Amino acid sequence: MFAQACFRTLIGLFCSMLLLSSCAKDIPAFVPPDQRSMHNSQQSWPKNKFLALAYHDIEDSDPDQAYVAVQTEHLIQQFAWLRENGYQPVTVDQILEANRGGKPLPDKALLLTFDDGYRSFYTRVFPLLKAYKWPAVLAPVGAWLDTPLDQPVDFGGKPVDRDRFLTWKQVREISRSGLVEIGSHTDNLHYGILANPQGNLEPAAAARAYDPNTGQYETDAQYKARIARDVDRITAKIRRVTGKTPRVWVWPYGAASGDALKIVQDKGYKMVMMLDSGLGDVHELQDIPRVLVANDPQLDNFANNAMIMENNTVMRVAHVDLDYVYDDDPEQMERNLGELVQRIADMQITTVFLQAFADPEGDGLVRSVYFPNRHLPMRADLFNRAAWQLKSRAFVDVYAWMPVLSFDLDPSIPRVARWDPRTGQTSVDPNAYQRLSPFDPAARRKITEIYEDLSRHALFNGILFHDDALLSDFEDAGPQALAAYRAAGLPDSIQALREDPATMQKWTRYKSGYLIDFTKTLADHVRAIRGPQIRTARNIYAEPILHPESEAWYAQNLDDFLQAYDWTAPMAMPWMENVPKDGADAWLDSLVDRVASRPGALNKTVFEVQGRDWRPSAHGKDSGHVDSALMAHWLKRLQLRGARSFGYYPDDFTQNQPRLEVIRPAISNAWYPFR
């Protein structure tokens, strides 16, 4: 990750045992009572927001989680709790009216949804809705209800008794009650489709199919045609049964793609539902979060989930190099991946920042990647496999970690150039990241296409933009960059740009904004293919946070990052910044304090400590792994100072570094400070 670190650090030693012993004396930073954050349940209900609950099957006893079932008794308790605590179920019509600027939703607006089309909706839920006079949405899978009464339902490859599911006659009766809106849960896309050469089955509505006979993936045209046919079939079935055109679309598994979403929108669906925590917003109806009611929760757990009004995620991150997983031997590579997935599962964290590019030389220049694409060699078709294994087996969110500019593309594409004040000459700096110029149209187009190809060939939750998106106070001095400065009303020579402090400041702010705009463009292209649920994060160096004037050296600005991205990821790496061994704690404190000085910023910031000492040693390129106990101390120090989200880079599962038994209590929500 930090290929340039060796040029920025000095020779030093690990922190002393005295420093380690000081962790017992750490105390949290004091926050005055009037500045402490309130629990969500203590805050006023936000205007025109609603809580959507996602139910599935209802059973009288022993609820089967293959069908995400809830006991009837528990459903009755949950409905009673919702009523007694002031939740007000609303209809699709009410939400759409509020969307159009009409009557706003009531406080504690609640949307009840039931997926798949189980017969228990008719026998257990429907009577309860009629007793309460509560509206709901029922979204069946068309092919399951089409199954003849004397045949089993093909439930994602598993034969299931037909009696478990509704009939279309029952759906008609339910629809005519006026209480229940019938939505679409696809006609026949509620299953896993072969999505990579290694045999992973991924959500059919979201993934491009892989054909093992040809070794090819579905084209965009084939994928879109498959989705469009399915939407047409289920829409026609519901219209025929109910006499109404369905308005609500529910994605199987909560997994979507941007292409599929556009098809659904174009075919008239007004509300599209996912699976996620937080509240829905009447002005964002194409990506509605729903809280999944799973594992037959006891009432206290159900209430805790229902009271979480906003998705203020606490992120705990392991930042992983796929280079550690890669091996020329496919069988060994698979064993390596299994070790990584098991380690992440054991760690009980929330998120993995996963390398999507290859950098075996460690110089930060990307010569190959781990996914099919148009412009670079594919070292192995590995990212899709690794991301899905981590998501489905370790139950973590996966952010695709990608460079912004450091791609080794055609030599004819201009690179970021530096102006040398001593000679007046312009050249590529050999001691810095070798970056394509963001001001060159060909560079921007090809980088964008690489991001698009990643999005077509993998399912992931977000993008982490690498720390290579920077421009020094002598960069970019290439002709395209100078032309861009001139078009922006700035001088078109680096010497002139630097001569006047006010002009220098304008130039710095222009470059910072230009890089952010480019990453936003990349994110837009990813979301167009992968879906609006994709989140963004970007690494930022510590210096622009601690010393804002250093923005001139990086073209990075904390306030810009907080506004532009879902997550800002400071590199909280004291030894990379030449901090003396006895000053690391105070340095980390000051970093957190700087972020905390911005209201709400700690809810959008994930601090990354270093797991490797990149300072040169006498025996190798760097000084090796950072002691696991010291890393754990740094993480706890961050938390005691007020940081909510944090992680580390790199995770070296091949050598159990950091040591699992040491780092897990410090990083896992399931451990520190609860155990």
Image: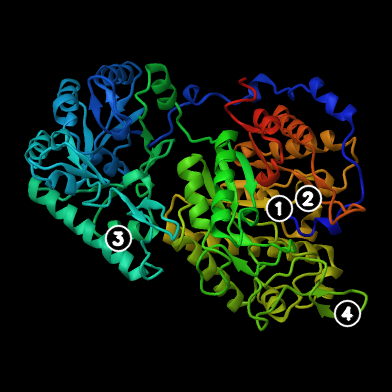
- x and y, in percent, of residue 446 in the image: 56, 74
Rounded to the nearest whole Å, what is the CA distance between mark 1 and mark 3? 38 Å
Answer with mark 3 or mark 2, whichever residue precedes in sequence: 3
Answer with mark 4 or mark 2, whichever residue precedes in sequence: 4
**What amino acid type should be assigned to the residue bearing mark 4?**
Gly
Q: Is residue 557 left or right of residue 255?
A: right
Rounded to the nearest whole Å, what is the CA distance between mark 4 and mark 1? 28 Å
Task: Confirm or deny contact between disc 4 and disc 2 (CB under 8 A).
Answer: no
Crowding around mark 4 (Cα neighbors within 10 Å: few <14, some 14 to 19, many 20+) is: few
The numbered mark at residue 263 is 3
- Residue at 54 percent across and 52 percent down: it is 334
Residue occupied by mark 1? 557
Look at discs 3 and 2 and give the one toward the viewer. 3
Rounded to the nearest whole Å, what is the CA distance between mark 4 and mark 2? 28 Å
Q: Looking at the image, which is closer to me, 515 or 393?
A: 393
Residue 429 occupies quadrant:
bottom right
**What amino acid type should be assigned to the residue bearing mark 1?**
Asn
What colouring method underlies this structural image?
A: rainbow
Residue occupied by mark 2? 548
Secondary structure category for the residue under label 2:
helix
Instruction: State whether residue 650 appears in this view.
Output: no
Answer with mark 1 or mark 2, whichever residue precedes in sequence: 2
Answer with mark 4 or mark 1, whichever residue precedes in sequence: 4
Residue 150 occupies quadrant:
top left
Residue occupied by mark 4? 424
Task: Confirm or deny contact between disc 3 and disc 2 (CB under 8 A).
Answer: no
Task: Confirm or deny contact between disc 1 and disc 2 (CB under 8 A).
Answer: yes
Q: Quadrant of the N terminus?
A: bottom right
Q: Is residue 571 left or right of residue 205?
A: right
Rounded to the nearest whole Å, what is the CA distance between mark 1 and mark 2? 7 Å
